[in-house]
């Protein structure tokens, strides 16, 4: 009977050792994403505590770990919500190759539409699902470089489209989720915002997202 307390103590020590080893091997620090574009790199810090749904969604799409509807199977009607009911669920780095389809000088740059290369339907697509706005009173569009979720007038229409501001935009407060902040590369954002555009704010010379790298670190790379 005397051996039982000793065995329990040894087991507890083993569990503590394993937990310490796991914690040591786990990356710590803030969550960042580097958006590689044809105009340069933009690094954002992601606000995982303030906007957990948007951040988890963005990270999952960017890294290819989250499923989304195959845009090839979508039914498109100009000016109408895209029908994904017959589209298959797929995985892969969602943002690779997508264009910034809407750019407004002094306001923001926008990307995330799978139909961005089609002028007729650019801005009309998403991942085939949606979720609501995460309004955080402590976060406002009070500075350049805010990373926000774009959505339509329909409820729960956040999905894959995002925008990055180039100036304070107080009119957006409370209506659009803020899920990150540019920490490196705001000059790249500003440069993209000033490219020549069509009457529908589409860049005349395409600016593409090459890849999005997500990592956790004590400071941005």
Image: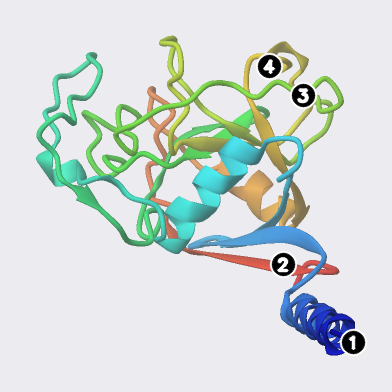
Q: Would you name the residue on which mark 2 appears?
A: 216
| Left or right for 15, reference 106 | right
Q: What is the crowding at mark 2: few (fewer than 14 residues within 10 Å), some, or many (at least 20)?
A: some
Q: Would you name the residue on which mark 1 appears?
A: 2
Q: Are marks 4 and 3 in contact (CB under 8 Å)?
A: no
In the rendered view, would you say 50 is above or below 15? above
Q: Which mark is residue 10?
A: none
Q: Which mark is residue 172?
A: 4
In the rendered view, would you say 79 is above or below 220? above
In the rendered view, would you say 122 is above or below 32? above
Q: What is the crowding at mark 1: few (fewer than 14 residues within 10 Å), some, or many (at least 20)?
A: few
Q: Earlier in the sequence, mark 2 or mark 4?
A: 4
Q: Earlier in the sequence, mark 4 or mark 1?
A: 1
Q: Nearer the viewer, mark 3 or mark 1?
A: 1
The colour scheme is: rainbow
Q: Can you say which quadrant of the picture contains the N terminus?
A: bottom right
Instruction: Name which quarter of the figure residue 8 lies in.
Output: bottom right
| Left or right for 135, reference 38 | right
Q: Residue at x 85, y 69 (%)?
A: 218
Residue 10 position in % (x across, y down):
84, 87
């Amino acid at each position: 009977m005397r051996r039982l307390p000793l065995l329990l103590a040894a087991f507890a020590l083993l569990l503590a050792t394993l937990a310490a080893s796991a914690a040591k091997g786990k990356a710590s620090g803030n969550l960042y994403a580097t958006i590689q574009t044809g105009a340069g790199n933009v690094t954002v810090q992601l606000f995982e505590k303030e906007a957990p749904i948007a951040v988890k969604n963005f990270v999952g799409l960017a890294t290819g770990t989250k499923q989304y509807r195959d845009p090839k199977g979508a039914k498109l009607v100009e000016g109408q919500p895209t029908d994904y009911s017959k589209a298959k669920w797929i995985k892969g780095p969602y943002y690779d190759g997508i264009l910034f389809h809407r750019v407004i000088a002094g306001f923001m740059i926008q990307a995330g539409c799978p139909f961005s290369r089609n002028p007729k339907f650019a801005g009309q697509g998403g991942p085939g699902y949606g979720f609501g706005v995460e309004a955080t009173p402590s976060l406002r569009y009070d500075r350049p470089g805010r990373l926000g979720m774009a959505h339509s007038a329909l409820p729960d229409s956040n999905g894959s489209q995002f925008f990055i501001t180039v100036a304070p935009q107080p009119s957006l407060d409370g209506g659009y989720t803020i899920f990150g902040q540019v920490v490196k590369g705001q000059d790249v954002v500003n440069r993209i915002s000033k490219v020549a555009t069509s009457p529908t704010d589409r860049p005349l010379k395409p600016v593409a997202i090459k890849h999005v790298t997500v990592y956790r670190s004590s400071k941005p790379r």
